[in-house]
Amino acid sequence: MNMRALLIPTALACTLSVGVTHAADDVSPTAASYRYGMPLHVARVISLTETSTVECEVVSANMKYIDPAGRPAEITYRKLSEGCRLQN
């Protein structure tokens, strides 16, 4: 049997499980999780934070903002880290 056929799916499964576990640790209990296509009603952004890393990888980020009604809100999302800007 081809070793590559077994190695690639195993590596992807391990990477995915570590990423999901890491992402679950960064989520604030009051923050909503962003879903693709979800409408955002942002009047003013208060802060943007993300997990710091020098590696180019997908990290959890958090945005605190004020909605058009004047209520504070918070949302978490996944994005490429700032380390990706420094790499060519």
Image (spheres, rainbow, N blue to C red):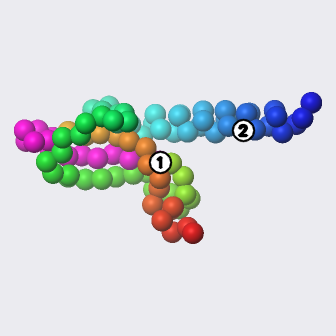
The quadrant in which the N terminus is found is top right
Q: Secondary structure at mark 1?
A: strand
Task: Provide the residue designation for mark 1.
Answer: 59
Residue 8 within the segment the image draws in magenta: no
Residues 69 and 25: in front is: 69
Q: Is residue 18 visible?
A: yes
Q: Residue at x 47, y 55 (%)?
A: 81
Residue furthest out toward the front: 37
Q: Main secondary structure of the magenta part?
A: strand
Residues 6 and 31: in front is: 6
Residue furthest out toward the left: 69
Q: Position of residue 53 (x, y in %)?
A: 50, 57
Magenta region, residue range: 59-72
Q: Secondary structure at mark 2?
A: helix
Residue 67 sits above or below residue 80 on the image: above
Mark sitting on residue 81: none
